[in-house]
Amino acid sequence: MEKIIGGIKRDCYPITEAQMLHLYTMTFSPTSEIVNMGTGRYLQMELDQAALREALNRAVERCESMRLRLWKEPETGQIWQYIMPYENQYFEYYDFSEWSEEKVNKVMDGWTSQPFDTFGGPLSRIVIVSMPNGYNGYYMNMHHMAMDALSIVAFTRDVMDIYCHLMYDLPYPKPMTSYIEAVKQDIKYQEGNKKK
């Protein structure tokens, strides 16, 4: 359904039953970061930061749920989801290579506990990091309304496959499954269950 959000027409879709459960959890939790998922992909090797940034950007462009936004309709209070057009991002770099693992974990726990602007802002954060003991890669924090654990695994694989293509000329990965098509199937299934 088309909606005007911030003066721009957007193709919007209702949230799924799984997303409603996360919304319910947020509503009755003292803090909204209960639905945050912090994770990372670190390899014990040197990584080319420019190639990693490029791989991350290409993966974000290919992964609709990384560009998902939620919007609460002012008149009805109904929550809609839509996909923002891709925009190139500069992912910040943090060098923790000389830090203790305990100190790094404390910083990342802090990042994971930062709440998202659920209705209007991005539902993901990514930074490139160098870790203790020669590990390098990226940390990401996702809002559970945008991705589940399996989606994070698929996104991570896409990033690494693109990175390997850029660095080692390995085959480019196949396109990712469309988030919106999956949402449409979910909604169709939900509507079919309501009719029964």
Image (cartoon, rainbow, N blue to C red):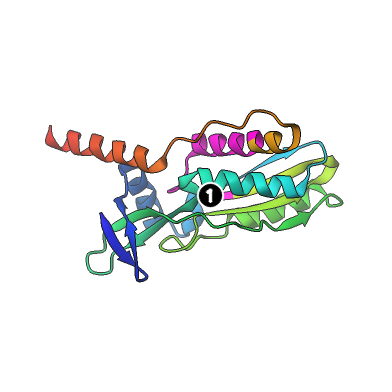
Judge by depth and name the residue closer to the eye, 190 or 65.
Answer: 65
Q: Looking at the image, which residue is at 70% across and 38% down?
A: 166
Q: Looking at the image, which residue is at 48% across and 52% down?
A: 67
Q: Could you say which quadrant of the image residue 186 lies in?
A: top left
Question: Residue 173: horizontal and vertical position, in percent?
Answer: 58, 31
Query: Disc 1 marks which amino acid?
Result: Met
**Label 1 sits on residue:** 142
Residue 13 highlighted magenta (yes or no): no
Question: Residue 99: horizontal and vertical position, in percent?
Answer: 83, 52
Judge by depth and name the residue closer to the eye, 113 or 96.
Answer: 96
Please tell me whether the stretch drawn in magenta is mainly helix, strand or loop: helix
Q: Which residues are magenta?
A: 141-161
Q: For the C terminus, which image quadrant?
A: top left
Q: Looking at the image, which residue is at 57% across and 60% down?
A: 114
Please state if 162 lies on the left or on the right of 103 as rendered: left
Query: Neighbour class for label 1 at 10 Å: few (<14), some, many (≥20)?
Result: many
Callout 1: helix, strand or loop?
strand
